[in-house]
Amino acid sequence: MSRRAATLVVASCLILLLGLAAALMPVPYVALRPGPTSDTLGKLGKAPLIQITGAPTYPTDGHLNFVTVAYQGGPGNRIDLFTALRGWLDPDVAIVPEETIFPKNVSTKKVEQENTQEMSDSQESATAAAMNELHRPVTVAVLVDSVQKGLPSDGKLRPGDQITAIDGKPIKDISGVTAGVGAHKPGDTVTFTVKRDGKETQVPVKTVVSPDKTGGKAGKAIVGVILKEKYQFPVTVKISVGDIGGPSAGLMFSLGIYDKLTPEDVTGGRFIAGTGTITPEGQVGPIGGIQQKMVAARKAGATIFLTPAQNCADAVAAKPKGLRLVRVDTMHGALQALTAIRTGQGGVPACPAA
């Protein structure tokens, strides 16, 4: 072999090795793929995914599936360049910057904890939405989530305390507590009525000036307490989804709860899937990963997909064959659309063309 040929062979080998090395280098991207899909009317293992006690339930038919997105990559477990390139060529996969899923300066553990909390919150909101749609009473308990060290509430109010009144006036939500404390001047004493360990007690707390200042004027009166609201329902609803996180199953949870608590046949025996966040008032919000969720739904057998209105444009652009997109703004609207599909009467809102 001539010197020139040998040089070309060596150079080619080096280029190939460098190319392989580059392809295996980790890159700051995450691959989003179609994830598992579960029937809210079905079971998780041997137990119903939605369990309701305290009220009669009715047999259900068909499917009301929520769908998920699986991800690959992230800090400490980055995908390589080859995986990213392959994902870019796959229409069912989305390659997104790492910070889209894992914000900078936020640990993976923290992101997972937030996703778990969002799932828990979505289940409570879904239960409230279903109860409101069924015209069943829903009340709100205002609880102490935490107290700020060094401020007046520290040592007086405790996490878990339920605040029922301010200065003897009953309160219904957090805004009532805020207004009650805010009606005082810094230095005044506010009397909290709280339920603690099953007993009601009066807790006087002196206010201080807020550290926030505007235009050189002292801030409002505060006591240094962080509050949260917890809904109280006429029935007990338990939703089991394993280690799935995030808020996007809210709509389908609410429909599943509704279907179990009414003799009405919501699905008409059809395989329906969908997605969307839900508020206690029944408003449906947009979600991420709509393309992957539609693919997962269609592969599972769904023929109808309930789509948040704000996701419609992206959904239409990537709709799998055989999947009908139904636009939803509210839980009530979703039920009306399903009734129209089931009976053949009335219009069914569809996602507009992109």
Image: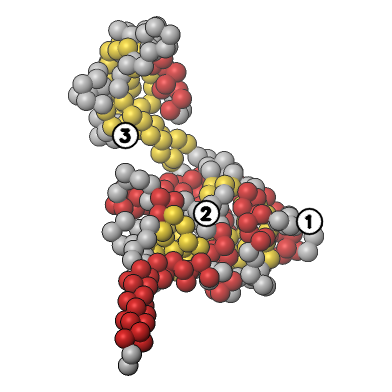
| Amino acid identity at mark 1 | Gly
Q: How many discs mark residues in the rendered view?
A: 3
Q: Indicate which label's residue lies in the foreground, 2 or 1.
A: 2
| On-image quarter of the C terminus | bottom right
Q: Which residue is disc 2 drawn over?
A: 288
Q: Distance between the residues labelled 3 and 1?
A: 45 Å
- Sequence-wise, the earlier of marks 3 and 2 is 3
| Amino acid identity at mark 2 | Gly
- Residue 47 shows in this picture: no
Q: Where is residue 255 in the image (x, y as percent from the top left)?
A: 57, 56
Judge by depth and name the residue closer to the eye, 45 or 114.
114
Question: From the viewer's perspective, is 23 left or right of 270?
Answer: left
The quadrant in which residue 2 appears is bottom left
Q: Residue 97 has which mark? A: none
Q: Position of residue 317 (x, y in %)?
A: 66, 61
Residue drawn at 34 percent across, 53 percent down: 112
Question: From the viewer's perspective, is 330 left or right of 187?
Answer: right
Q: Residue 347 has which mark? A: 1
Q: Which residue is disc 3 drawn over?
A: 145
- Residue 102 shows in this picture: yes
